[in-house]
Image: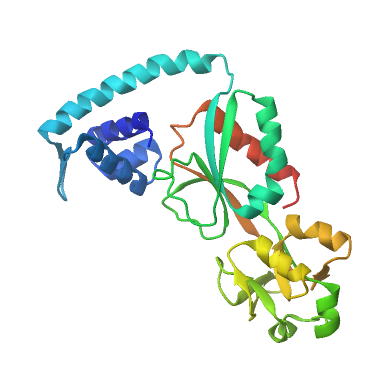
Amino acid sequence: MDRIIAADVFIKIVEQKSLAGAARALDMSRSMVTRYLNQMEKWANTQLLHRSTRKITLTSEGEKVLNHSRELIAIAQNISAPIESNNRLNGQIRLSCSPFLAHDVLPDMLQQFLHAHPEVSIDVQISNHVTNLVEERIDLAIRITNDLDPNIIARPLGKCHSVLCASPEYLEKNSKPITTDDLSRHNCLNYSRFEKSMWHFSHPEKPVSVAIAGNFSANDSSLLLKAALNNQGITLQPKFAAQKYINNGTLIHLLPHLKPQTLNIYGIYRSRKHQSLALRSFIDSLVTYFDKIDT
């Protein structure tokens, strides 16, 4: 955990006289402020604040830690200005993202960014689980979802469009679905992190939700894609991953008159006010990149 950010959070809690006030002042989630305070008390090995329903007051040890925190922030401000004044990006960015993004979407963008900024390093942590940014020391987590926790700090990066598809061999044996009702008679390969047993589609008149069933599910869309390529069933895939197989005829685009529900792509981070120049530039580059590619 970043001790400078933790010190700044502790100062803001004292100044605002509440965790909620500190969260608002720092543009940070309440849960993140609590984690930083807990870590400060762990480092100090003592309680730093007396907390009641009405007010927050410093313990005697908290007074000492507050003074040290202010000294640390002053030192950090003195050394950070000249480092970033030349506008050269440097430092490490720890990035968390899903296997699909890491393998199919981001490799070119990451290499382009590193080539343009040789003093920056990027450490990619591939994961499908919800990341604890503080505990795992993640600077940025990229997530594809329409169910974002309102308490976290996030920036929209782009959209993820999907297509329904299956192999010609599977369709030859099981017939091609003509309507959404036909999907109930097929082996549907489901992405288990989203709503189970339901696929959602847009329609000019009204949205359509379809109950589906199948013998294989996974929390990694690339596994479902491989299963479809092996003639195991129908899959709902990110367009970016499936389009090349549709173009060469390995997969068939099904029910093209319906548009699967579009998902949002977010960049999730700890605070807007405590971002390095490299991280800010990287997030801006992601927005530009996702705007150019057809995800």
Q: Which quarter of the figure has residue 49?
A: top left
Place of residue 229 in the rendered image (x, y in percent of width and height, measured from the top left): 78, 68
Residue shown at 36%/45% (left/top)?
32
Colouring convention used in this rendered image of the protein: rainbow
Q: Is residue 122 left or right of residue 108?
A: left
Residue at (53% x, 34% y) in the render:
93
Q: Residue furthest front?
A: 230
Left or right, residue 76 beside residue 239: left
Q: Position of residue 8 (x, y in %)?
A: 32, 30
At x 29%, y 40%, the residue is: 39
Q: How many marks?
A: 0
The single residue placed furthest to the left in the displayed view is: 60
Q: Quadrant of residue 246?
A: bottom right
Q: Is residue 260 visible?
A: no
Relative to 54, residue 61 above or below: above
Residue 24 in the image, given as x and y percentages of width and height? 36, 41
**Residue at x 52% of width, y 41% of height:** 140
Left or right, 146 with reference to 181? left
Judge whether 180 appears above or below 191 on screen: below
